Amino acid sequence: MESAEKLVVSPTVPPIAREQYNKLAATLHQARLERDIRVVMVTSAVPGEGKTFTAANLALTLSELYRHQVLLIDADLRRPTVHTVFGIANERGLSDVLAVEGPMPLVKLGSCLSLLTAGDSGGNPMKTLISARMRAFVKEARTMFDWVVVDTAPVGLLSDAKLVASTVDLTLLVVLAGKTPYDVVQAAAASLGPEQIFGVVLNRVPEAALPHPYHQGYYVDYCAGRTGTKP
């Protein structure tokens, strides 16, 4: 399946998948009203769990459903992929913003959605993400947008996501249903800290696990609610 066909704005995406993102967006919207949350990090324990599509679809849903101004940031400086999801170039992005002062090289994806790609993936990602400029950049983005959604490297393999976590309000942990071992998920959650994790996105739940009437012969992205229990 092409990348664009996995986005919630595609007519090929099953309605139940869009509904789960709507529910996740609604939960975050309520949290914002209660706690003034604006910056959300999306990560996973290991690669291949769907974190980038989750971040992209969450950003799309927040911008489309609530008409909020949303900035989607690709902070996975080692293996940036958000730009490929939307089929655009990755010429200048986050790494360039943090290296040299200047305007954000944002890409407008719609009237309410902007994208900041990762930019040059060379250099030292850890040093870049922990810098004072990174904190200042996130602080500035918080004042410019209603929501900032940050896609990061998997927390189970690298410390990059943990570094970014110190600059955001909350974290969503993406887990591939039926594939990622529970002890791996546990280790990733422990690395971030339970106070940082807002919830778990259980991705690609098989149809047999879905309640009636959603048994329609497809896999979906199912967004779980707040968690503190075994995903």
Image (cartoon, rainbow, N blue to C red):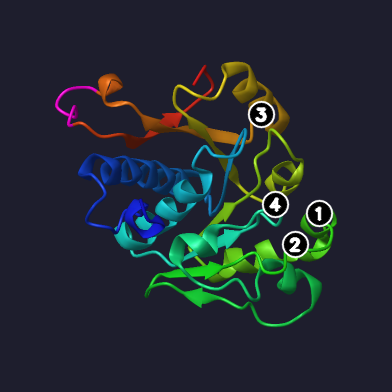
Kindly report which numbered mark, 3 or 4, lies closer to the viewer in this rendering: 3
Check disc 4 and report the residue beneath it: 167
Q: Residue at x 37, y 75 (%)?
A: 111
**Tag 2–tag 1 contact (CB < 8 Å):** yes
Q: Earlier in the sequence, mark 2 or mark 3?
A: 2
The secondary element bearing badge 1 is classed as loop
Q: How many marks?
A: 4
Q: How many angstroms separate mark 4 from mark 2 (CA)?
A: 8 Å
Check disc 1 and report the residue beneath it: 130
Question: Which residue in the rendered view is the most extreme toward the left?
Answer: 213
Q: In which image quadrant can residue 17 be found?
A: top left
Over which residues does the magenta segment extend?
211-216
Q: Residue at x 73, y 63 (%)?
A: 121
When the figure is inspected, residue 66 is found, relative to residue 109, above or below; the finding is above
Out of 55 and 33, give the one closest to the viewer.
55
Check disc 2 and report the residue beneath it: 134
Check disc 3 and report the residue beneath it: 188
Q: Is residue 4 left or right of residue 94?
A: left
Kindly report which numbered mark, 1 or 4, lies closer to the viewer in this rendering: 1
- Residue type at mark 3? Ala
